[in-house]
Amino acid sequence: RESIKKLPKPSGAIVFYGALIRADLPVDCPSHLQVFDEHYGSLFISISTEGDQRAPAGMATLIASIFVDVEEWSNLNSQSYTSKKNIQAKRIINIINNKFNLLYNDWEHQELSTPRSFEKWTSRPGGIVGGLGQHPSMFGPFGLSSRTPLKGLWLCGDSIYPGEGTAGVSQSALMVVRQLMQTKGRFLNIPVFN
């Protein structure tokens, strides 16, 4: 309980979703990258690859995300919210356009999700995303454990080591399964495929 009280506030995100013709992207365009921006800090970008089924043939999807304070979005009236959302979308598009030498007209589709969007569509309180950021002071033995003092209650998810994302959440669930099985004298063997 004391550890939880000391945790930092969880963050939210603004996420840009776009679609464009793949030929408009550079030939050697990576599928994942991080771009530094003076206003946002880190902007995380993910681009579909040809044939990965995230976009029709010849097209590409691009997702760009930034962590934000959910409080910045929570108490805005409708007009202020729409204005802020439009400003953020334009800033992100400009960063992406400059990075990949794109024009505004190159975009076939674009939209922006905010903490309010995540709260509405996922019911996450305040629109928080990603759990606790993995920082050296909260990582590994210093972070939240999958074990709890309550008998039979185990934790897994994006706030439990190893952290955020599908891979991190899956790994934290796998750790809990292994620990539970060990309490029963059983062991989990997962085959490795090469």
Image (cartoon, helix red, strand yellow):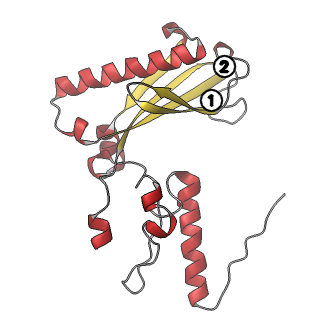
In x, y percent, where is residue 86? 32, 20
- Disc ID at residue 55: 1
At numbered mark 2, what does the secondary structure look like: helix, strand or loop?
A: helix
In x, y percent, where is residue 146? 47, 73
Tell whether 8 sits left or right of 18. left
Q: Residue at x 34, y 48 (%)?
A: 128
Tell whether 125 sits left or right of 44. left
Count neighbours of disc 1 (C-alpha within 10 A) and say few if under 14, some if 14 to 19, many if 20 or more: some
What amino acid is found at the position of numbered circle 2 in the picture? Arg
Q: Quadrant of the C terminus?
A: bottom right
At numbered mark 1, what does the secondary structure look like: helix, strand or loop?
A: loop
Q: Quadrant of the N terminus?
A: bottom left
In x, y percent, where is residue 160? 46, 64
Tell whether 96 sits left or right of 9. right
Count neighbours of disc 2 (C-alpha within 10 A) and say few if under 14, some if 14 to 19, many if 20 or more: many
Q: Nearer the N terminus, badge 1 or badge 2?
A: 2
Looking at this view, is 50 or 101 the one in front? Answer: 101
Is label 1 in contact with label 2 (beta carbons under 8 Å)?
yes
Q: Is residue 158 visible?
A: no
Q: Residue at x 24, y 20 (%)?
A: 83
Which quadrant of the figure has residue 177? bottom right
Looking at this view, is 138 or 24 the one in front? Answer: 138
Which quadrant of the figure has residue 154? bottom left
Badge 2 is on which residue?
22
